[in-house]
Image: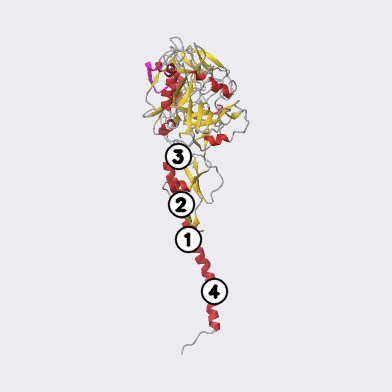
């Protein structure tokens, strides 16, 4: 006969099992929790990996502050499966991926957070950002049009209009107006891009304007310099090209045009944010013999068509997503576009190049700031964003050669740029005659093969884009971004003005002539090699791409 357990024995077994449970359960529970946490971390890693793969095929903002990437975006584009579960809470993951650009390592940094924080703001459209500047009844700053409730425009001084700067497609723009129903913005370049004669005779018809030198420059030369991603976002626009007192007397439809006198007046005319204390062309005639322009005093005046004045481009674009900036000159609104090497750089962007010369041409940091003029199959043409520290005479004749006096300073400067960066072969510089009133293409009938040169009339940034002011208080650029900003109020070009004078750019924004014996500023133009990688920077004046 089997003996049964006594009550005492059963209680002992239960106590032993209880003690074992107290010992084993925390270990098992901890192991389960660790397993779930490990599974969660694995899921988070897969989310961050998916975000990294997404960044390869999609443009993300290059902001150094965190921005958000919604999980639905990754799911909808096939980078993640739907209904991701948090194994710890057994609930659906509803967080987001925060990302920012790590400039030290030149790559994106990703981190998943759940719940998704209320900061930072998701990148917003430019129009939605600008609308926050509007208050009912504004008479300066951002104002609503009295006849169109969807149209907003800017009016006032630079103090009253200080937050409509946009860095876009290699250029610094000011927003003129935007339409909330069409989701479009009209922009004008902050800087003059070149200085040319507008036309051989005042236009009094659409056809005459469309065949003018200045329209050709805008819709051929300038247009072709824009990156295709920018071109695809520029819309056809109606430009008023009639007489300045009746601007819509004649109109034209183009991709790129000029400011009209009515727009200038609406902005506030003299001392407004559009008055840059630099003469520039308007799209209107002044009378039957004179072309309309804005004077250095900010007034609308008339000039002979042979006068060679600054050119500022006007375009209309579809709304864009802004990833950083506050709209000021030093921190303009920006899109996500950014190059990682020189082959991707856009015309107009800035590049810092190491300089080893002993003449302190590029400041204490020994980095020369250049601006991209053009690109070809094996090099990129750039022009110094400023002047050399010493002025120079031109040479013995108005037709430049590499034996001219000015090449002493040019060659000395070139020696300070390492062959690692500088294209050391010869390139073509156009040195033809540019008499006042002629076509900017006329300079192409004579050429000089050289490794370094000066700006050529009609090229990008062959005008007063660096603001050769008579004052150290620059009106349309950040003086801190200019090399040797007060050396001279004139600089030499590659071109003759006529048989007696060499072409120069002057502080008023016009192209003119000077005797070769004059001592003026020197602005070198060189070619950089293709294939060079950038180590940082954003391509702007305040943060140029860096070559090291």
Q: Earlier in the sequence, mark 4 or mark 3?
A: 4
Q: Secondary structure at mark 4?
A: helix
> 495 or 134: nearer the eye?
134
Q: Which color scheme did the rendering employ for the protein?
A: secondary structure
Q: Which residue is mark 3?
A: 59
Q: Which residue is mark 1?
A: 35
- Residue depicted at 38% across the width and 27% down the height: 376
> 136 or 303: nearer the eye?
136
Q: Residues within 10 Å of mark 3 (few under 14, many from 20)?
A: few
From the viewer's perspective, is residue 297 above or below residue 369?
above
Q: Name the spot of residue 409 as percent of width and height, x first.
A: 46, 20
Q: Are marks 2 and 3 in contact (CB under 8 Å)?
A: no
Magenta span: 443-455
In the displayed structure image, the side of residue 276 where residue 372 appears, left or right:
left
Q: Name the spot of residue 525 as percent of width and height, x first.
A: 44, 23
Q: Residues within 10 Å of mark 4 (few under 14, many from 20)?
A: few
Residue 18, labelled with which disc?
Answer: 4
Residue 45, labelled with which disc?
Answer: 2
Q: Residues within 10 Å of mark 1 (few under 14, many from 20)?
A: some
Q: Secondary structure at mark 1?
A: helix
**Residue 59 visible in rendering:** yes
Q: CA distance from mark 3 to mark 1?
A: 36 Å
């Amino acid at each position: 006969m089997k003996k049964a357990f006594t009550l005492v024995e059963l209680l002992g077994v239960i106590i032993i099992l209880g003690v074992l449970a107290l010992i084993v359960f925390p270990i098992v529970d901890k192991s389960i929790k660790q397993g779930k946490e490990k599974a969660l971390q694995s899921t988070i890693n897969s989310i961050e990996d998916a975000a990294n793969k997404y960044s390869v095929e999609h443009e993300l903002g290059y902001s150094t502050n965190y921005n958000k990437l919604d999980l639905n975006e990754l799911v909808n584009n096939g980078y993640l499966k739907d209904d991701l579960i948090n194994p710890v809470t057994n609930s659906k993951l509803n967080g987001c991926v925060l990302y920012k650009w790590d400039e030290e390592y030149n790559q994106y940094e990703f981190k998943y957070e759940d719940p998704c924080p209320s900061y930072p703001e998701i990148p917003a459209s430019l129009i939605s950002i600008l609308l926050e500047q509007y208050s009912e009844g504004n008479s300066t700053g951002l104002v609503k049009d009295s006849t169109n409730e969807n149209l907003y425009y800017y009016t006032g001084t630079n103090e009253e209009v200080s937050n409509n700067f946009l860095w876009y497609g290699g250029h610094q723009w000011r927003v003129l107006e935007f339409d909330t129903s069409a989701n479009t913005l009209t922009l004008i370049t902050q800087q003059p891009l070149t200085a040319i004669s507008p036309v051989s005779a005042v236009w009094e018809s659409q056809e005459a304007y469309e065949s003018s030198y200045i329209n050709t420059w805008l819709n051929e030369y300038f247009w072709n310099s824009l990156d295709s991603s920018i071109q695809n976002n520029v819309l056809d626009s109606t430009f008023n090209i009639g007489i300045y007192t009746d601007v819509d007397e004649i109109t034209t439809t183009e991709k790129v045009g000029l400011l009209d006198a009515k727009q200038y007046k609406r902005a506030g005319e003299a001392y407004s944010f559009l008055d840059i204390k630099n003469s520039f062309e308007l799209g209107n005639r002044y009378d039957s013999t004179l072309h309309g322009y804005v004077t250095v005093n900010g007034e609308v005046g008339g000039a002979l068509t042979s006068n060679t004045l600054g050119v500022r481009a006007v375009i209309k674009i579809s709304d864009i997503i802004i990833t950083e900036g506050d709209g000021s000159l030093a921190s303009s609104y920006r899109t996500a576009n950014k190059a990682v090497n020189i082959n991707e750089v856009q015309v107009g962007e800035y590049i810092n190049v190491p300089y080893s010369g002993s003449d302190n041409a590029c400041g204490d940091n020994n980095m020369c700031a250049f601006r991209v003029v053009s690109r070809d199959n094996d090099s990129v043409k750039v022009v110094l964003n400023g002047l050399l520290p010493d002025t120079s005479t031109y040479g013995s004749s108005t037709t430049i050669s590499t034996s001219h006096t000015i090449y002493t300073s040019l060659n000395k400067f070139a020696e300070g740029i390492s062959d690692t960066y500088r294209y050391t072969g010869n390139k073509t510089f156009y040195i033809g005659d540019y008499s006042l009133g002629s076509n900017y293409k006329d300079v192409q009938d004579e050429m000089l093969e050289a490794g370094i040169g000066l700006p050529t009339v009609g090229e990008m940034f062959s005008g007063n884009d660096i603001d050769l002011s008579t004052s150290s208080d620059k009106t349309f650029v950040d003086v801190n971004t200019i090399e040797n900003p007060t050396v001279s109020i004139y600089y030499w070009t590659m071109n003759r003005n006529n048989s007696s004078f060499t072409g120069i750019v002057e502080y008023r924004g016009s192209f003119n002539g000077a005797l070769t014996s004059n001592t003026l500023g020197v602005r070198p133009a060189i070619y950089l090699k293709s294939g060079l990688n950038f180590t940082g920077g954003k391509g702007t004046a305040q943060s140029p791409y860096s070559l090291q």
